Amino acid sequence: MKLYEISEELRMVGMRLAEGIDDDGEIPAEVSDELDALTVAMEQKLDGCCALHAEMAAESAAFKREADRLARLAGAAARRADWLKSYMHRCMVAAGMKSVDAGRFRVRIQNNGRPSIRLADGVPIPEGIPEAYRRVTIEFDSQAAYEAWKNNLTLPDSIRVERGTHLRIS
């Protein structure tokens, strides 16, 4: 995919970048060294890197669209398979069959390994849940801390506020 004219030198670094990434997404240090070694003005290097970034972002978006399309197809196939399995279960239960030798397959109705346990209909939550069966989850509310920080309230020493930087390409 070539959206921009990029110098051959920078395009080679881009190819090394694409080839050198391992399964964890780690980029080898040599790629950074190769970029540092390019003998062009900083403006040219940034322009080329921005163009390369745009191409990589477009490629990533295309892969994401294809992954989403395949995920939709996989979900549809799984739903059809689940429906067919449920249909066979309903038919066997209605016919009173526990086991059938169906040629290539043996089909059986079995008890689940673990029963489903839930609250009875109409039990109010949380007051209807017996104390022994309650689970309490405590989480850090970073949004509340941010709102307090934004309103110039003093935060406890256990909370750190750090402002990073990012690169904007326009």
Image (cartoon, helix red, strand yellow):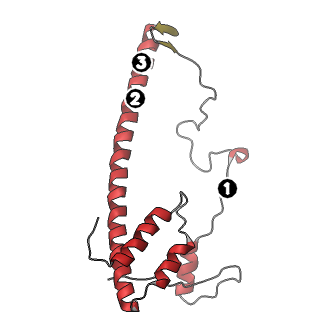
Among numbered discs 2 and 3, the one appearing first in the sequence:
2
Q: Quadrant of the N terminus?
A: bottom left
| Distance from the alpha carbon under mark 2 to that under mark 3 | 11 Å
Nearer to us of marks 2 and 3 is 2
Q: Position of residue 20 (x, y in %)?
A: 50, 64
Residue 97 can be seen in this image: no
Q: Quadrant of residue 160?
A: bottom right
Element carrying mark 1: loop
Of label 1 and label 2, which has the lower sequence position?
Answer: 2
**Residue neighbourhood size for the residue with mark 2, other residues' Cα within 10 Å, grouped as few (<14), some (14–19), many (≥20):** few
- The amino acid marked with disc number 3 is Met
Label 2 SS: helix
Where is mark 1, residue-wise?
136
As rendered, which of 10 and 93 lies closer to the eye? 10
Left or right of 69? Residue 14 is right
Tell me the SS state at disc 3.
helix
Image height check: is 117 above or below 5? above
Residue at image x 49%, y 8%? 100
* Disc sitting over residue 88 in the figure: 3
Q: Does residue 13 appear left or right of residue 143 in this picture?
A: left
Quarter occupied by residue 61: bottom left
The residue lying furthest to the right in this view is 132
Residue 133: give x, y in percent of width and height. Answer: 69, 44
* Circle 2 residue: 81
Residue at 52% from the left image edge and 86% from the top image edge: 150
Residue 5: image location, x then y, percent: 26, 77
Amino acid at dot 2:
Ala
